[in-house]
Image (cartoon, rainbow, N blue to C red):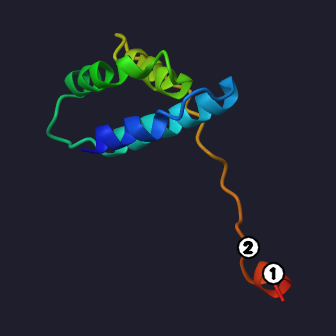
């Protein structure tokens, strides 16, 4: 279920390369966070790749997701350079005061 949702969120059509990389990395992190601890990682990664690969041609973000899946199964394991969003403040008291 989460895999289907992740793929549908990634399948946004053409976007610039930097945006596709950002979205693909977020999708991989979402998929990874939803894995159950009792399942084998490699099998789940290959299952996710099989489901996502048909969308690679039409969506660069899905292609980035698939590249991360393949890179994560390489032996010996390599460090993946995931680019997650930078923390940012979204307002707080100062923003509320400025709204009036």
Location of the C terminus by quadrant is: bottom right
* Residue 3 shown left or right of residue 43 in the figure: right
Up/down of 75 relative to 95, above or below:
above
Please give the name of the residue rendered at 14% of the width and 39% of the height, measured from the top-left corner: 38
Q: Quadrant of residue 37?
A: top left
Up/down of 46 relative to 9, above or below:
above
Please give the name of the residue rendered at 24% of the width and 44% of the height, measured from the top-left corner: 1
Label 1 residue SS: helix
Q: Are marks 2 and 1 in contact (CB under 8 Å)?
A: yes
Q: Which mark is residue 94?
A: 1
- Work out how far the residue at label 2 is from the one at label 1, CA to CA, in angstroms: 6 Å
Please give the name of the residue rendered at 43% of the width and 34% of the height, measured from the top-left corner: 28
Question: For mark 2, what is the residue?
Answer: 91
- Looking at the image, which is closer to me, 39 or 5? 5
Up/down of 37 relative to 74, above or below:
below
Q: Position of residue 10 (x, y in %)?
A: 47, 35
Label 2 residue SS: loop
Q: Residue furthest left?
A: 38
- How packed mark 2 is, by other alpha carbons closer than 10 Å (few <14, some 14-19, many 20 or more), is few
Up/down of 40 relative to 27, above or below:
above
Q: Position of residue 69 (x, y in %)?
A: 39, 22
């Amino acid at each position: 279920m989460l895999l289907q949702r992740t793929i549908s969120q990634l399948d946004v059509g053409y976007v610039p390369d930097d945006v596709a990389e950002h979205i693909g990395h977020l999708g991989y992190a979402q998929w990874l966070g939803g894995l159950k601890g009792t399942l084998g990682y490699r099998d789940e990664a290959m299952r996710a790749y099989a489901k996502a690969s048909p969308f690679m041609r039409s969506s660069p973000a899905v292609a980035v997701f698939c590249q991360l899946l393949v890179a994560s199964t390489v032996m010996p394991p390599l460090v993946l350079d995931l680019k997650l969003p930078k923390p940012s403040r979204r307002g707080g008291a100062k923003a509320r005061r400025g709204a009036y």
